[in-house]
Amino acid sequence: MDNSNIRDDLKPTGADAAHTVAKASLSSIPVIGGAAAEIFSAVFAPPLNKRRDKWLISIFDGLKRLEEEIKGFKIEELSKNDKFITVAMQASQAAIRNHQAEKLEALRNAVLNAALPNPVEEDIQLMFLHFVDELTPWHLRVLRLFDDPRAWGLKQGITYPESHLLGSSSKVLEHAFPELVGRRAFYDQLARDLFSRGLMKTDSLHTTITAQGMFASLTTDMGKQFINFVKAPVEKV
């Protein structure tokens, strides 16, 4: 099977039918109905088909990659896996609501990880999908940074200054992401959000700590599990 076949197999969904119904309803409004329907169509049509098609093709490509890399993995077997189907459907609904590349990548990786043998417990998978859906790309960036600030910096080509004997995690954050300098209210809320979901150990990035403490991991065991769940299961997947 190839991508052209996948595209041929994609059919209108219930959401697309809802778009058609909405347009028809707008057309029935006296005087402005026709114009409103045309504007609706111009702005949103095809609003779901394009996102849905791109999403499904990306999932198919990822599953094919898993089939190539993992011995014994067969895409056809997934049709018998109710837990995978549930996760894939939940992720798909979230993906269609989103356009941000980082969130779409996280959702895609979650589906691919759910397809693997011995995945994370089903309820935890669904909880993590909910987190991806409601959090922002900045939440994901901050969480990945504080999982291991030095390893993250090495991967990103960022060198941290070594002159401070004491400091705070906020200094690490602002050095890693200069665009957050002067936006304390914003990134404090990010930290509180991650803490409230049990993904980070602290809700404050401003406690004075040693230089060693500044670069210690701030993610909880659940936070690490979440990061792995939204990370690509194999390279170039």
Image: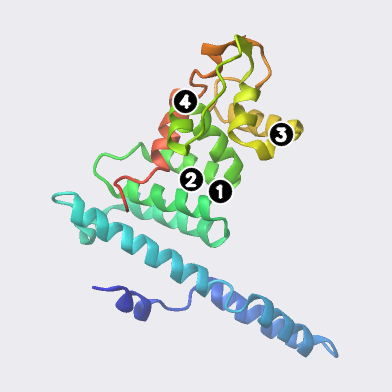
- The residue pinned by badge 3 equals 181
Of callouts 4 and 3, which one flags the residue occurring earlier in the amino acid sequence?
Answer: 4
In the image, 69: left or right of 158? left
From the viewer's perspective, is residue 52 above or below residue 40? above
Mark 1 touches mark 3? (CB < 8 Å): no
Instruction: Residue 231 in the image: state x and y as whole percent.
Output: 40, 43
Residue 135, visible in the rendered structure:
no
Which residue is located at x 36 percent, y 55 percent?
85
> Alpha carbon of mark 1 to alpha carbon of mark 3: how far?
26 Å
36, 207: nearer the viewer:
207
**Residue 10 locus on image (x, y percent):** 40, 76
Question: Which image quarter: residue 62?
Answer: bottom left
Q: Can you identify the residue that label 4 sits on? A: 150
What separation in Å lies between label 1 and label 4 (alpha carbons)? 28 Å
Badge 1 local density, few (<14 within 10 Å), some, or many (20+)?
many
Whole-number angstrom distance, CA of label 1 to CA of label 2: 6 Å
Q: Quadrant of the N terminus?
A: bottom left
Residue 129: numbered disc: 2
Q: In this rendering, does residue 38 appear at all?
A: yes
Residue 117 lies left or right of residue 86; in this view the side is left
Residue 133 shows which numbered tag? 1
- Display coloring: rainbow
Q: CA distance from mark 4 to mark 3?
A: 19 Å
Give the quarter of the image for residue 191.
top right
Distance between the alpha carbons at the discs numbered 2 and 4? 27 Å
**Can you tell which of label 1 and label 4 is closer to the viewer?**
4
Secondary element at image label 1? helix
Instruction: Report whether 71 appears left or right of 166.
Output: left
Amino acid type at circle 4 is Arg
Kindly check if marks 1 and 2 are in contact, taking CB atoms under 8 A apart as contact.
yes
Q: Which circle's residue, 1 or 4, is located before the other in the chain?
A: 1
Name which of mark 2 and mark 4 comes first in the sequence. Answer: 2
